[in-house]
Image (cartoon, rainbow, N blue to C red):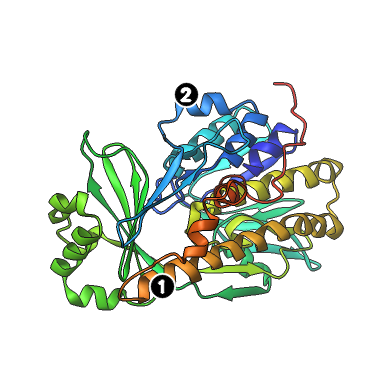
Amino acid sequence: MLGLLLARAGVEVAVLEKHADFLRDFRGDTIHPSTLEILDELGLAERFLAEVPHTEVRRLSMRLPTGAPFGIDFGRLPTRFPFMTFVPQWDFLRFVTTEAARYPSFKLIMEAEVEDLIVENEQVRGVRYRAPAGPGEVRALLTVGADGRTSRVRDAARLPLVETSPPMDALWFRLSRRTDDEDVVGFRLSPGHFFVLINRGTYWQVAFVIAKGVFDQVKAAGLEAFRRALADGVPELADRVAEIQDWDQIKLLTVRADRLRRWYRPGVLCIGDAAHAMTPVAGVGINLAIQDAVEAANVLWQPLKQGEVRLADLARLQRRREIPTRLIQAFQRLVQDRVLRPTLTADRGLKLPLIVRQALQLPGVRDLPARMIALGVLRPHVRTPAVRL
């Protein structure tokens, strides 16, 4: 997204992608209204919704252990797009890079794995990378690390990291979906377990959330116990849990959360998960990262075109994005501590306190979770210009 915005403003950009394609099954799926509004400001929202297969969800449903329903409704939010869009991120990335490729100053280099930074006189001047054809390098006025929670750029830049310990991990797998299945994205809570169901058209993508560090115990109990827990927690899928025949079908997602104390040093900047890894709670990670990209383009397009990016420019970007980052991470911690931890550790599972249930019926309060998830905090708007094609 940052590459698209900068190329659109006439800045020369090279994007390095480690793999030969974008098909990573663990990439985020949720495109929130905040991101759809950004696409709309770029004139791309209607084409995205028309061309990219997706599922639109106006309400997230949660079934508590008591059987009581609880939902988050996006229909009342002040936006043109009162829904979450579920789309495999590889399709979203293809859409964005195809649009970016229309600009002559954009270059995408696939199968280019960054190995180290080029540093001269304590200034980062680009990166060295490894490709099938051999080693290469890209020299640049500014190097941006948007390479995720295990960022090579961040490590090479030796930027200070603050880590926290979320209480869960997730097991990620697929079950078949039938045409008469309920067309929703839902959550299922049962004592000791938390399930997320994502409709991918022909199959359900399932996240089986477990307490952190217990995967070895889950495997030791055996596949039959795993299938039984799945059938008990998601009874509408009980007739197809036998599709899980091998542990190789189940991938462990180790959940982590962290943030950089400082996002930059001379010649290098980190954004997205490289600057602040988010937990899967509410699927906000990709959307927060895109907001980082929009603000980075707003702040940096002119310095880049003028040929000088000062530390003050990078510091200004961090100041603008750090408050939303900390508030969203605080929101995630609240959900983890008040919802997930009791569910994963208590015998009876979660029961929302009466005062909380009553507060969530009030018009001024009931939409706060939806607003936080869908629109975020202090979201930026596109302020970069567009060159003529």
The picture quadrant where one finds residue 103 is: top right
Q: Quadrant of the N terminus?
A: top right
Q: Quadrant of residue 76?
A: top right
Q: Taking the image as drawn, is residue 28 in sight? A: yes
Mark 1 neighbour density, 10 Å: few (under 14) some (14–19) many (20 or more): some
Q: Mark 2 — residue? A: 50
Provide residue 222's location: percent of width, then percent of height. Answer: 16, 72
Residue name at image x 83 percent, y 41 percent: 302
Taking 384 as reference, is 155 left or right? left
Indicate left or right for 113 with 179 as reference.
right
* Image quarter hosting the C terminus: top right
Please state which amino acid type lies under the numbered disc 2: Ala
Residue 383 numbered mark, or none: none
Is residue 21 visible from the viewing direction of this image? no
**Closer to the camera, 204 or 157?**
204
Q: On the image, which quarter does residue 187 sit in?
A: bottom left
